[in-house]
Amino acid sequence: MIKKYLSGIKLLLIGICFSASSCEPIYIPDPIDPRLPKYTEDGNNVAGAFINDELWKSEYFPGWFSTSGEPMIQYFSSRDSLSITFFGAIDEPYYYEDISFGFRGLGVTSLAELVKLNETKIELDGINSTANAYRSSDCVAPGSGQLYFRSMTFNTETGHLTLSGTFGFNQDDPACGKISVTYGRFDFTVSDFIPM
Amino acid sequence: MKKSLLLMVILFTGTCSPMLAQVYVFSGIHQSYVRNEVVVGESPIYSWHVGGGVNLYPTLDWKKTSINAEAAFIEKGYDQHLGNQQFEFRFRYITGQATISYEALPFLSLKGGVNLALLFDTNKEKGTSTYQLFDFGLVGGLGFLENKRFGFYTRVVYGLSPMLKYYNIDAMGNFNGHIHDLKNTCFMVGLRINIYDKKISLRN
């Protein structure tokens, strides 16, 4: 009887270990510039960019009991606007810095509907589509540039969306000066969509 | 790639019937680097290789010309320096090589042929899915004292096929086609030990 319980516990531990290890973000270095993650469309749960030539990284650690770094996708029905935020940090010296995008009138009201944006390049004009690298709460000037949703796939069985793409934009903020975000790329599998 | 494979098959099958002359093992060091136009701050590395081969003489009359087939393990790669960071790229290959050897002098052989390498491991996460599995190149070199128990060799493997096929992404995130780049080059020197040498015993 004890043996039976022990083998059950063993199986459970193996299952937990397997689940935990399979949820680690997969950081494949870019073959041209290995400071950045390679551009992938596999849901590796990483993003990277240069902010004023400093490396910025975002990593999502999904888990059963706690998660960290999951991109936040919010929909504001009153304004028909969508926001996507990648939580990340500058590598050296280490400090948190998030990159956020906002869009009006895309007609996306759920996670599954985000696949409408597959292969879509959105020009960030600073009016209907904006970007922001939150260097501090004072940096509010909208960025202009481009966000490219290159691959958006929704798994109806799991309810997960894999979103992959690239971005680049510039901000000229009176308080924070010029901020240049270049060589941005992201590849996440997410499940949360927050209607507001 | 198909043509090169066919050429190697022809070379190997053409040597099935003739008399076996030499079987040997070899090991040495090499300088490896990549010729390219996309990676910045790269520098060559020094590593080692080990393998074995056979020297086959098509007929008994061919005293000076032989066909050479080798298999080897070799680590190629490069280092990349970006800012104050250094990144190491290492690629481990199993290679098959077919060359024609001509004995220009009693102690000196000239060799030329083709080299086909299979990438089986790298030091990068999912490296075998990032880089091309097959690497095709030309090889040329010199063999010294090949009729003795111990000989030496020097050779150059000049990669022709790109190791990398990847997106060309600009700073704003536009995809501008694909990059086909990174070609291996290896300068090798080493020691060769004959473990079976019928040619020597025939001459004696």
Image (tube, coloured by chain):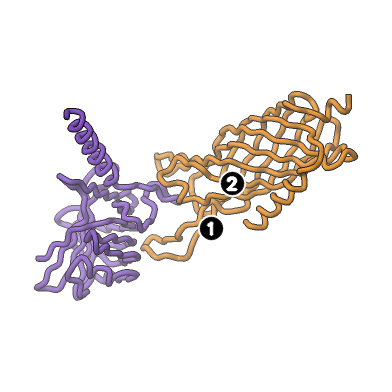
Chain colours: A purple, B orange
Residue A179 in percent (x, y) is at 27, 57
Res A98 seen here: no
* Label tally: 2
Amino acid type at circle 1 is His
In whole angstroms, how far apart are the C-alphas of marks 1 and 2? 13 Å
Foreground residue, B48 or B52? Answer: B52
Q: Quadrant of the N terminus of chain A?
A: top left
Foreground residue, B118 or B87? Answer: B118
The numbered dot on residue A82 is none
Residue A10 in percent (x, y) is at 23, 34
Q: Could you say whether the residue bearing mark 1 is in a helix, strand or loop? A: strand
Above or below B74: residue B145: above
What residue is at 21 percent from the left and 53 percent from the top? A70
Q: Is residue B162 left or right of residue B112?
A: left
Which residue carries the number 2 mark?
Answer: B184
Q: Is residue A103 left or right of residue A187?
A: left
Foreground residue, A160 or B39? Answer: A160
What residue is at 17 percent from the left and 32 percent from the top? A5
Q: Is residue B204 left or right of residue A148?
A: right
What chain does badge 1 belong to? Answer: B
Amino acid type at circle 2 is Asn
Mark 1, residues whose alpha carbon is within 10 Å: few (<14), some, or many (≥20)?
Answer: some
Residue B122 in percent (x, y) is at 47, 41
Above or below A24: residue B161: below
Name, please, the residue furthest toward the front: A1
Mark 2, residues whose alpha carbon is within 10 Å: few (<14), some, or many (≥20)?
Answer: many
Q: Quadrant of residue A121?
A: bottom left
Q: Are marks 1 and 2 in contact (CB under 8 Å)?
A: no
Q: Could you say whether the residue bearing mark 2 is in a helix, strand or loop? A: strand
Which residue carries the number 1 mark?
Answer: B180
Q: Quadrant of residue B111?
A: top right
Residue A9 in percent (x, y) is at 19, 34
